[in-house]
Amino acid sequence: MKIAIASDHAGYNYKRELSVFLKELEQQVLDFGTFSEESVDYPDFAFPAAEAVAGNIADFGILICGTGIGMAITANKIVGIRAANCTSVEMAEMARRHNNANVLTLGARITDLPLAKEIAKTFLFTEFEGGRHMIRIEKIHSITGN
Ligand code: RB5
């Protein structure tokens, strides 16, 4: 799979670690920055990475900031993106099974790195269940246009 990854300064070290982890899992990583711990604004990195997912350049996105919240708010503005901010493996599993989330957001100041890796792995390798969950997702789109 191709994974679009991005962070702000707060998530920069997690982005580096998760990129290595994803490559160990034999996934292709498309890195949309940031590329240092210098303070930046998370929307500048969330938008291009989320657009890569929405445009089918990447299969999934992983966006990391301090809490994961700003990244989720930003990514969810893009048509076709269903971003889920997950703080547990269970949330990651359900975000895929029930919500067909295509972007995972993580909080580097909230979730420790070993757990963040497990969350990412679970997110990437859990299938959407479809069925009644697809009907609900289609309702989101029909009501909001996204
Ligand atoms: C940066 O200090 C912090 O606000 C950002 O990483 C993120 O947590 C926002 O949601």
Image: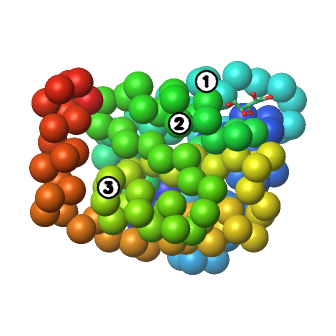
Q: Residue at x 41, y 57 (%)?
A: 95
Q: Which residue is mark 3?
A: 100
Do the CB atoms of the residues marked 2 and 1 lie less than 8 Å apart? no
Per the rendering, the mark at residue 44 is 1
Q: Residue at x 14, y 58 (%)?
A: 132
Amino acid under disc 1: Asp
Q: Quick one: quadrant of the C terminus? A: top left
Q: Is residue 63 left or right of residue 98?
A: right
Tell me the quarter of the picture where residue 117 sits. bottom right
Amino acid under disc 2: Ala
Q: Quick one: quadrant of the N terminus? A: bottom left
**Ligand 1 sits in quadrant:** top right
Do the CB atoms of the residues marked 1 and 3 lie less than 8 Å apart? no
Is the CB–ligand 1 distance for label 2 below 8 Å? no
Spatial CA distance of label 3 from label 2 is 15 Å
Q: Which residue is mark 2?
A: 72
> Up-down: is 128 above or below 32?
below
Q: Secondary structure at mark 1?
A: helix
> Up-down: is 86 above or below 27?
above
Q: Position of residue 55 (x, y in %)?
A: 31, 39
Q: Secondary structure at mark 2?
A: helix
